[in-house]
Amino acid sequence: MIKKLLLILAFVNFNMLAAQVPFTDNGIRYQITSGSTVGVIDNFPDYYSGSVTIPETVIYNGTPYEVTSIEDFAFESCIYLTNISIPNTVTYIGQHAFFACASLTNITIPNSVTSIESFTFAECSSLTGITIPNSVTYIGESAFLNCSLLKDITIPNSVTSIGEEAFNSCVSLTDITIPNSVTFIGSYAFYFCTGLTSLSIPNSVTSIGSFSFSNCSSLTSLVCAIETPLIIDPSVFNFVNKTTCSLTVPTASLNDYLIAGVWKDFNSIVGSNTLNTPDFFANDNVSLYPNPFTSDLFLEFNNGNEKNVKVINSNGEVVITKTINGLSNSIGTSILSSGIYVVTIKSDEGTITKKVIKN
């Protein structure tokens, strides 16, 4: 009886050891992860190169296994890897899985994957585009850090969280629309995205971390659909030119943004009922000059629709009102003392505000 038990234990131990021993099939190295599944692992001391196609299944010692994962560090620093094909059987792509794959230019993530882990595609310096399926709910810390050529990316409306430094230093990104499923944007998430010119933040966002959009020095259009201005750290928009970047917010929330910390620093705050179509409210459609001023203020518009203009002092009191028709007009300001004022211009399309200074 004891001998039989020892044989059974030896058999079990043998099978357990066999499961821990990696094997290679058609140039790809695998690790058995369960009785029926395997994951792709690194090929050290060799590195994967060229075009690699991961199969849905492999056979090892006569047993078929389904490929369900790309393990942590599997393709890290494979600088000559140019293309990767991932099957729909893969549900997990690990941390650092494609870190520093400097020749990888494009990748499609299958819709079986639910998260992009930390540093998964960081330092992929040739990556220009990536397809993220709407099965992904989480983009991890530094997932695309320093992907300097990445310019084509759509964040699907399944994503709820964008991790810290997720797109840090993606200097070729020009516009980002964050979907209305995202609630969390981590610190430094879009830090130093110097090519970013337009950005849309949905009403679903409840937290924006420090330095999230810092050093986005080319940003000229910021649309924020959040109805109640979030309390954010002053660093969030560090080195964003708030004189040239317009902020578009819900019309009903306009007055709240005018006094909210950080948000109020934007020189042009636009109220709109249709946030995705600012139309008349674009900065180049409204001119208000000179600023600072000493006498009259002059206004020019790109359309002749009727507009109601108000000048509001620092106490929130309306000191001048005027209805304007046509493409240009002026406001007499002799009754105003020196100080900072807010000019609101309202039409059927919404409301725009501009800060002005009388010397």
Image (tube, grey):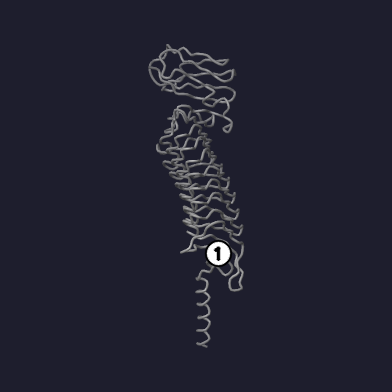
Q: Is residue 292 left or right of residue 58?
A: left
Where residue 16 appears, as percent x and y from the top left, is 51, 74
Inspect this view and state whether residue 3 appears. Answer: yes
Provide the secondary structure element on which disc 1 rests: loop
**Amino acid at pointer 1:** Gly
Q: Is residue 225 above or below residue 316?
A: below
Where residue 160 appears, as percent x and y from the top left, is 53, 47
Inspect this view and state whether residue 95 appears. Answer: no
Q: Is residue 214 left or right of residue 181?
A: left
Badge 1 density bin: few <14, some 14–19, many ≥20, Cα 10 Å: few
Q: Is residue 163 above or below residue 200?
A: below
Instruction: Give the quadrant of residue 303.
Output: top right
Look at the image and tell me in which quarter the C terminus lies. top left
- Using the image as rendered, state which of residue 190 and residue 60 is in the foreground: 60
Q: Is residue 221 above or below residue 129?
A: above
Where residue 357 appears, as percent x and y from the top left, is 41, 20
Circle count: 1
Where residue 62 appears, as percent x and y from the top left, is 61, 73
Residue picked out by circle 1: 27
